[in-house]
Amino acid sequence: MPVTFRIPSYLAAFADGQSEIAVSGSPRTVREALEALWRLHAGLRDRVVDEQGEVRQHINIFVGNDAIRFADGLATAVPDGAEIMIVPAVSGG
């Protein structure tokens, strides 16, 4: 089964207006899934990861309900058919 990304509305412009994108293949990690996403929509890369290829500080990525920051980062396992959400960090005071 494909892995599905949920993209926030402010990034949808870099994904041909799509807020949900399925990537084919069977990515085993978040890094592999993101690489598949970049092949479809290269403009998203610089908005999600920095020059070193690490997730930007103001971006959170979830596999299902689990934040990858508290798991194995980009090496977090991606189950077949998983949903990956890219979410802007919320802050305030």
Image (tube, rainbow, N blue to C red):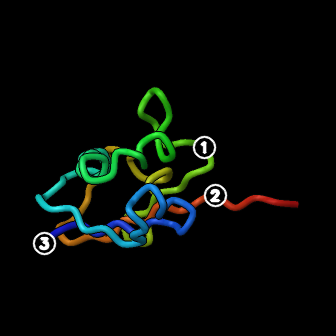
Q: Residues within 10 Å of mark 3 (few under 14, many from 20)?
A: few
Residue 76 visible in this rendered orientation of the protein: no
Q: Are marks 1 and 2 in contact (CB under 8 Å)?
A: yes
The kind of residue on which mark 3 rests is Met
Q: Amino acid at mark 1?
A: Gln
Quarter in which the C terminus is drawn: bottom right
**Amino acid at dot 2:** Ala
Report the disc number at residue 1.
3
Sequence order check, earlier mark of 3 and 1 = 3
Quickly name the residue at label 2: 89
Q: Is residue 35 visible?
A: yes
Residue 24, disc: none
Q: Secondary structure at mark 2?
A: loop
Q: Position of residue 92 (x, y in %)?
A: 82, 60
Neighbourhood count class around disc 2 (C-alpha, 10 Å): few under 14, some 14–19, many 20 upward: few
Q: Residue at x 25, y 68 (%)?
A: 22
Q: Which mark is residue 57?
A: 1
- Secondary structure at numbered mark 1: loop
